[in-house]
């Protein structure tokens, strides 16, 4: 089964797609590269101002760390995840000519978009952690390798969703309009601007089923508090995310033969 799932995947071509995506989105103009850092910083600044100056938010879980580091450590992985899904959802529809004229494993298009987005935001994430350290936050760098492994698992989850969304958008063009508000809803139902402990017990129980909740908590625990307690939920994620990727890839390949008829 594993052999059939990797059929037609060209590593050299995939690297070319990733490099092309990085150049196209971030490196070919100063605006694209600067926006990679400026946009999250602007949003982070707005959220920090609103919640600390206007609403006077106090998060007990943050302790002496403060709201901004508590927010930033969770915000950057979410930004990579969200942007990767939104960009990759149109990967097939936006490359209709390539899909129609060149024989290759079409799944490489959304996967390359997700990979390029995570690579660039990963660099931005490291820069943010350095800035937090310089501003006085005690970042636990020894746990960074584990955090990077979690980023790879998050990348795999984004790849799974991207495969499903990009294939579905070929047949249902409304996906391009539906996905952004869905991602916004997902953002506010993930404990990025707040902690799970601030919620009523029944809402906290519901939120435990949100996979991003687990990721956000782990990034904070690792980098801000120097602890790692994945629990049974962590084991479930390690099993469920690769399984979801395999199912999404199978879905994608099942319908990829009909792409040309709808592009």
Image: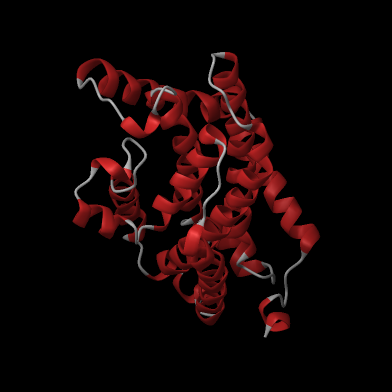
Q: Does residue 48 sit above or below 242 in this rendering?
A: above
Residue 228 as seen in the image, left or right of residue 47: right
Q: Does residue 130 sit above or below 226 in this rendering?
A: above
At x 39%, y 51%, the residue is 213
Q: Residue 122: x, y in percent? A: 61, 38
Viewer can see residue 80: no
Q: Residue 204: x, y in percent? A: 27, 53
Q: Does residue 206 sit above or below 246 in this rendering?
A: above
Q: Residue 69: x, y in percent? A: 46, 26
Residue 209 as seen in the image, left or right of residue 131: left
Comparing 227 with 165, the one in front is 227
At x 50%, y 77%, the residue is 251
User: Quadrant of the rendered structure where residue 130 is?
Assistant: top right
In the picture, which quadrant includes the N terminus? bottom right
Q: Does residue 44 sit above or below 173 in this rendering?
A: above
Residue 155 as seen in the image, left or right of residue 236: right
Comparing 67 with 79, the one in front is 67
At x 32%, y 50%, the residue is 186
Viewer can see residue 98: yes
Q: Residue 87: x, y in percent? A: 49, 49
Count of numbered labels shown in the rendering: 0
Colour setting:
secondary structure
User: Quadrant of the rendered structure where residue 44 is?
Assistant: top left
Residue lying furthest right: 12
At x 56%, y 23%, the residue is 138
Comparing 206 with 49, the one in front is 206
């Amino acid at each position: 089964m594993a052999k059939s799932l990797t059929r037609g995947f060209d590593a050299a071509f995939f690297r070319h797609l990733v490099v092309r995506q990085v150049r196209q989105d971030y490196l070919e103009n100063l605006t694209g590269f600067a926006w990679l850092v400026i946009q999250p910083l602007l949003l982070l600044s707005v959220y920090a101002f609103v919640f600390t100056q206007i609403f006077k938010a106090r998060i007990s879980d943050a302790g002496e760390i403060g709201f901004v580091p508590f927010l930033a450590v969770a915000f950057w992985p979410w930004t990579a995840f969200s942007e990767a899904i939104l960009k990759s959802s149109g990967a097939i529809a936006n490359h209709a000519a390539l899909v129609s004229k060149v024989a290759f494993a079409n799944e490489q298009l959304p996967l390359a978009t997700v990979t390029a987005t995570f690579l660039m935001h990963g660099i931005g994430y490291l820069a943010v952690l350095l800035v937090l350290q310089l501003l006085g936050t005690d970042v636990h760098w020894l746990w960074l390798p584990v955090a990077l492994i979690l980023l790879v698992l998050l990348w795999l989850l984004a790849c799974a969703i991207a495969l499903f969304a990009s294939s579905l958008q070929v047949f249902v063009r409304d996906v391009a309009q539906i996905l952004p508000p869905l991602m916004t809803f997902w953002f506010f139902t993930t404990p990025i601007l707040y902690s799970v402990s601030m919620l009523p017990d029944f809402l906290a129980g519901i939120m435990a089923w949100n996979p991003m909740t687990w990721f956000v908590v782990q990034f904070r625990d690792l980098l801000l508090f120097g602890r790692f307690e994945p629990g049974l939920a962590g084991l479930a994620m390690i099993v469920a995310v690769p399984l979801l990727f395999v199912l999404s890839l199978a879905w994608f390949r099942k319908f990829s033969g009909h792409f040309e008829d709808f592009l």
